[in-house]
Image (spheres, helix red, strand yellow):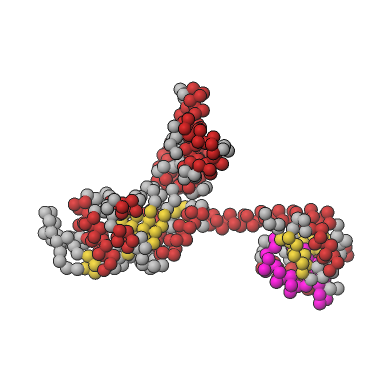
Amino acid sequence: MSKPKLLIVEDDSSIATQMKWALAGDYEVLLAGDRRSAVEIFIEKQPLVVTLDLGLPPRPGEVEEGFLTLNEILSQKGLVKVIVITGQGEKDHALRAIGEGAYDFFCKPIQIEELKIILNRAFYVSQLEVEHRELKQRMSGESFEGMVGTSPQMQEVFSTIRKVATTDVPVLIAGESGTGKELVAKAIHLNSSRKGYPFIVINCSAIPESLLESELFGHEKGAFTGAHIQRKGRFEMAQKGTLFLDEIGELSLPLQVKLLRFLQEQKIERVGGREEIEVDTRVLAATNRDLKQALSGGKFREDLYYRLGVMTISLPPLREREGDALLLATALLRKYANESGKKITGYTPQAIQAIKTYTWPGNVRELENRVKRAVIMAEGQKVTHGDLEFESPYERYEGQGLKGAREAVEKDMIQRALGRNKGNMTKAAEELGISRPTLYELMEKLGIEK
C-alpha cells in the first residue's frame, strides 16, 4: 500500500531536510522551497496535506508570499489540509491563515512528535472528506432513466447506454428475465435524437405466430379473414422513433427473414401488400435466451444475429450487482410507502440481511413484487423478514435433526459459493475457508455435481 503524500513548503533547507527524515517513515514527503515550485508539485502530485511556512522567497521576512501560496493551493483543491508553521510571535498571522482556509497552525520551534499528531489528524479528516465526496458522487449517479444501481456492472451499463444512444445502430440487450431490458431500451431511446418520436414495444413471445407478422408489418384490407381495413404495423407506428422487439429469440424463421430485410434496406411490405414501404425506425432487441446456442441449433439466423448485435449490452443478474439489491429495495420501499400513505421508515436488520444474501432468481422484478407486498402487509414502521415472505433461517431445517440440518447448511453454502465463483473450485474453496481436496470430499458426500 502506497504512503499518503505530504508536501512540506519550507525555504530553510536544513529544517526541510530534518522534517523529511523524521516523517519519511509514515509519508511520501515532497519538498518545495518557494511558491512556484510548491504549486507545481501540488498540482502534479495532489497531496492531501501540506505544511506551509509563511516566510517564503523572494521576501522571506514577510508573510504575503506564504498567503499567496495558501490561496493558490486551496483554489486548486478545496479538500486539502494546509497546516501553517509560524513563529511564536506571529500568532495573528496564523489566525489570519485559519480565516483564509488553513486547517491548523503549528508554532516553531518544531517538535516532531507534536507535529506527527497534528498531521495524523489532518490526514484522517481529509480522507474522510474524500470518501464522503466520492460517496455523494456515486449516489448522485445511482439513478439513470428509472434504473437504480451503483455497482460497477451497472455503471458500465449506464456508460454504454450513453455511447450507443448517439448512434442509430441496432442494439441487442441480453439478460435474465426481470433484469430490466425494457428499461435499458427506453433509456437508449430517451438519450437519442429520436426521443421526441414514438417508442413502440412488442413482445415477440406474447403474440401467436399467426398474428405476429401482421402486428409487426401491418396488413392490407382483405389480406386475410377479418382484415376489414388497412392497418399499419409496429414498424410504421415507430416511424422516426424506436421499435423494441422483446424476446427476439422467439421469432419464427420466416419472420426473421423479413426482419433481416428491413435491417438491410429499411423497407417493409404489409401482409397482403405488394408495395415496398420505406420506414425510418431504429430497432432494439432483447433476449433472455442464449442466441449463440439457438444459432447452432438452427433456430436463429446467423446473419440476423450479427445484424442485430452490432452492439450488445449484457445486463448482470441482481445477485452479481454488489450492494444494488439493498439500494433498490430502499428506493422501492420509499416509492410504495408514499403511494400507500404508510409511515414505513425502513427494514429491520434481519430483513436487510435477507435482502443482501438472497440470490434473487427473479431479479429486480421479484424484488419489486416482494417489496410491494411487504408494504401492504407491514404492521409496524419497519418491514420485517416475514413481511418480505422470506422463511426464517431455521424453518427450512425443521424435522431434519442436527445432522441433517448441518449437511443442508453445508450443501447450501457450497452451492452458493460455486455459483458466485462460476464453478471455479479453487476460488470457491478459498471463500469457504477450506482446502480444495476437502471441498471435493464434501461435494461427493453431499451429492453435489462438479
Q: Residue at x 75, y 62 (%)?
A: 29
Outermost residue on the bottom side: it is 58
Q: Residue at left 24%, top 67%? A: 267
Q: Percent x, y for residue 52?
A: 78, 66
Q: Is residue 182 above or below residue 368?
A: below
Report x, y in % for residue 447.
44, 32
Classify 179 as above or below 50. Answer: above
Magenta span has 41?
yes
Compare residues 61 and 1 and report the one nearer the observer: 1
40 to the left or right of 317: right
Say which of 24 and 231 sits in front.
24
Quadrant housing the C terminus: top left
Total count of labels: 0
**Quick one: which residue is furthest to the front in this view?**
437
Q: Name the side, left or right, on which 201 lies relative to 330.
A: left
Q: Is residue 380 left or right of residue 89?
A: left
Q: Quarter of the image for the N terminus: give it.
A: bottom right
**Residue 322 showing in the rendered view:** yes
Q: Position of residue 161 (x, y in %)?
A: 43, 61
Residue at left 50%, top 32%? 442
Q: Residue 108's spot in the image, x, y percent? A: 86, 62
Q: Can residue 247 be seen in the rendering of this structure? A: no
Magenta region, residue range: 34-59
